[in-house]
Image (tube, rainbow, N blue to C red):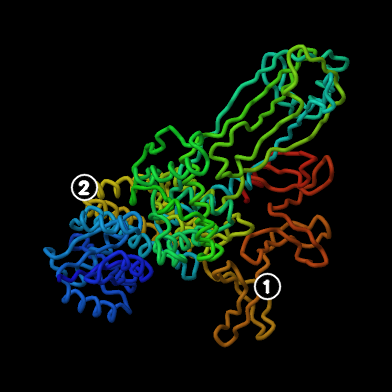
């Protein structure tokens, strides 16, 4: 009987696959990559055609020795790593490291770890796809070039061991740009006016919102405008001029891609992108389910496709028909294209067996595994169901030339919402008492309800919204979102507080240098075009070494220019008037992983350090002492009084020495404007040109 060896990445995956194959199959794991570029050098031979210098990863010697023994025993070797660029590259590295004979080596891929999928993959075994491998090699080398060329520049500029990355630098810039938008945002006042009407024959009043006049919509931007409208409406004879009854549908959501899964898990389960991917990997590779053995519960987790196999589609529709009725099964073809290049795995994320409901597997999963599986399962089943249907009613109410509108909606067929609802799917009923009214219904005004509001600054990015932006702008690929966000948080360029991402002082410094010296690297369009070139490599249209060789000279020139500029702007230790209590020297300002701090210049003889409180030349509006720049425990910057805790003044925006002429409160700097700290005051003025220049 012939012997076969199957090599996968992880032991969990090996265990799941082993039970689908016969005794003549041995399944072993490589534990990820076995070769990589060396850490001690860039590892790319620039002088000789940009050849990569791969070495065996430290600690993999024993594992490779074991694999070589098994290779000698086997009549054929199947490389069964993940179905994407990274997986293809791992298979290629294994074939080179183990010196596999091409005649007796095959590449197999499966989108789900099920018996049918694994056995079919062996029937459809193929050669290693070198276009996929070359695309991954090009990406790896581009990232290595950026990291190993730019990081020393950052080290010299900011004085400590920082590093740059091709995708992470763009992500950092996106977050910094949003922070600048927020800091420069000036709130605009606006008012809402509602009218409460008594309806003939109804106990419940009808609430209508001010729309404008009978010709166009009007915004109310001040209390004076509001009072004029209210005065114009005194004694008005209000009439219902139009009532419309209709129906609207809300389509079922598409099954998850990597991006949408990360976004929804962040919003609904409060999972970080890293945690979501770790749990999804466990569900994909296999979990021991009571009564079923080790089962791969979901399909491959790194994908931007919403397509689903015909077999899975039919199984889901059959499940819906049996459990929710035939009227709930969708009649539309939901395997629509997304209109963009589909990468890696070519199916959406879905359960491998729809009949393994969350209830059945709950006892076999950890709490978090269950919550993610339930989200994936419900989303997939919902995607095969009919839209939800609402009965809508809208009314126009006119008086003295002005118009108010009221609207309500009632869920009449829940469709997919019988299985899956998101925050946006809650039944939305505006107003009340609409279903029983018509054009002839008599109404009378009870009262007006007035409310003041201010426009809000753009929200800070969360992990979910950042992933959405990266995907929409075509930056990175599904497999890169989680490690990118994890890296910029781990390096303290960005901190996470209550789901929001905030730039630290360190992040601002790094972003500033990147924009000044390496503008193309952090340019969104440049990064998107580079992704398109990598797609071209995968399609076999572009030579991978052409991409690398065209990229390197521009990078080298930018690094040389930055190094020249660096000599002129190099940050020296700034001496302060703070005296070291231990040795009497004047302490100096140093940069650390968390930003600036005070240190004794007598290091290593004197190791005294203390927090650096940077004065901004503004007196505290509460006690008159100096306002200093401070940081939260996680590194987010704010402005506070040096006399804390006796004085509790703090502001996220920089305060000025000027006072508001309307209310005498402090004015804050926002972009090129000075804004009153009290939003309800609303005072705004342009900053003096000289002041702007100083800043």
- Quadrant location, the N terminus: bottom left
Name the disc covering residue 540, or none: 2
Element carrying mark 1? strand
| Nearer to me, 488 or 366 | 366
Comes first in the chain, label 2 or label 1: 2
Please identify the residue farthest to the bottom as the structure is shown: 605
Q: Which residue is mark 1?
A: 577
Horizontal side of 435 relative to 84 (left or right) equals: right
Badge number at residue 369: none
Kindly tell me whether residue 197 is visible in this rendering: yes
Q: Considering depth in this image, is 139 or 194 the residue closer to the camera? A: 194
Q: Nearer the viewer, residue 583 or 494?
A: 494
Element under label 2?
loop
Is 3 on the left or on the right of 567, as rendered? Answer: left
Q: Residues under labels 2 and 1: Cα distance?
A: 64 Å
The picture quadrant where one finds residue 417 is top right
Q: Is residue 225 above or below residue 304?
A: above
Residue at left offset 34%, top offset 58%: 114
The residue located at (77%, 26%) in the rendering is 433
Image depth: mark 2 or mark 1 in front:
2
Label 2 packing within 10 angstroms: few (<14), some (14-19), many (20+): some
Residue nearest the viewer, comparing 286 with 589: 286
């Amino acid at each position: 009987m012939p012997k076969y060896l199957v090599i996968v990445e992880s032991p969990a995956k090996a265990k799941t696959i082993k039970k689908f194959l016969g005794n003549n199959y041995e399944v072993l794991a490589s534990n990820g990559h076995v070769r990589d570029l060396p850490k001690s050098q860039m590892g790319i031979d620039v002088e000789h055609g940009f050849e990569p210098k791969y070495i065996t990863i430290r600690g993999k010697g024993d594992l490779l020795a074991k694999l070589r023994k098994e290779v000698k025993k086997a009549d054929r070797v199947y490389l069964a790593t993940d179905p994407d660029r990274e997986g293809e590259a791992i298979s290629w590295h294994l074939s080179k490291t183990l010196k596999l004979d091409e005649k007796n080596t095959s590449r197999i891929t499966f989108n789900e770890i099920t018996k049918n999928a694994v056995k079919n993959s062996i029937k459809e075994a193929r050669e290693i796809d070198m276009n996929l491998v070359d695309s991954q090699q090009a990406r790896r080398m581009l990232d290595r070039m950026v990291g190993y060329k730019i990081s020393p520049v950052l080290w010299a500029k900011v004085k400590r061991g920082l590093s740059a990355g091709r995708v992470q630098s763009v992500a950092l810039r996106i977050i910094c740009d949003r922070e600048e938008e927020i800091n420069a945002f000036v709130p605009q006042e606006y008012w809402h006016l509602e009218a409460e009407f008594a309806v003939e024959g109804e106990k419940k009043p009808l609430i209508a919102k001010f729309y404008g006049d009978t010709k166009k919509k009007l915004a109310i931007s001040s209390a004076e405008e509001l009072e004029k409208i209210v005065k114009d409406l005194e004694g008005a004879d209000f009439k219902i001029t139009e009532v419309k009854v209709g129906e609207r549908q809300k389509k079922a959501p598409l099954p998850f891609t990597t991006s949408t899964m990360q976004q929804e898990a962040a919003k609904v389960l409060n999972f970080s992108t890293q945690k979501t991917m770790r749990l999804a990997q466990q569900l994909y590779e296999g979990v021991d389910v009571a009564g079923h053995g080790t089962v791969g519960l979901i399909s491959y987790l790194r994908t931007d496709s919403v397509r689903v196999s015909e077999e899975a589609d039919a199984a889901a529709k059959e499940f819906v028909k049996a459990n929710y009725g035939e009227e709930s099964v969708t009649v539309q073809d939901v395997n629509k294209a997304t209109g963009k290049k589909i990468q890696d795995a070519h199916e959406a994320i879905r359960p491998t067996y729809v009949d393994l409901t969350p209830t059945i597997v709950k006892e076999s999963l950890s709490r978090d595994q269950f919550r993610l599986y339930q989200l994936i399962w419900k989303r997939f089943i919902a995607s095969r169901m009919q839209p939800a249907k609402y009965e809508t009613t809208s009314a126009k109410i006119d008086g003295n030339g002005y118009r108010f509108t009221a609207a309500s909606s009632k869920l009449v067929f829940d469709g997919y919402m019988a299985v899956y609802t998101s925050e946006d799917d809650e039944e939305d009923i505006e107003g009340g008492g609409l279903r029983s009214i018509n054009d002839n219904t008599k109404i009378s005004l009870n009262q007006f309800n007035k409310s003041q509001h201010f426009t809000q600054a753009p929200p800070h990015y969360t992990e979910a919204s950042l992933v959405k932006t990266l995907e929409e702008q075509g930056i990175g690929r599904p497999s890169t979102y989680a490690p990118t966000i994890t890296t910029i948080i781990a390096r303290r360029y960005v901190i996470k507080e209550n789901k929001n991402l905030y730039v630290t002082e360190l992040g601002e410094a790094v972003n500033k240098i990147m924009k000044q010296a390496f503008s193309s690297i952090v340019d969104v369009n440049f990064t998107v075009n580079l992704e398109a070139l990598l797609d071209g490599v995968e399609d076999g249209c572009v030579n991978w070494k052409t991409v690398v060789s065209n990229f390197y000279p521009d990078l080298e020139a930018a690094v040389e220019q930055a190094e020249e500029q660096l000599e002129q702007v190099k940050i020296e230790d700034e001496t302060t008037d703070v005296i070291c209590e231990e040795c009497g020297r004047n302490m100096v300002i140093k940069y650390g992983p968390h930003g600036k701090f005070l240190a004794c210049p007598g290091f290593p003889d004197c190791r005294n350090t203390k927090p650096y409180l940077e004065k901004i030349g503004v007196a505290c509006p509460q006690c008159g002492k100096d306002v200093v720049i401070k940081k939260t425990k996680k590194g987010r910057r704010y402005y506070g009084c040096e006399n804390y805790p006796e004085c509790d003044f703090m502001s996220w925006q920089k305060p000025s020495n000027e006072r508001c002429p309307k209310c005498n409160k402090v004015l804050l700097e926002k972009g090129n404007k000075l804004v009153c700290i009290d939003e309800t005051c609303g005072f705004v003025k342009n900053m003096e040109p000289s002041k702007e220049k100083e800043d």
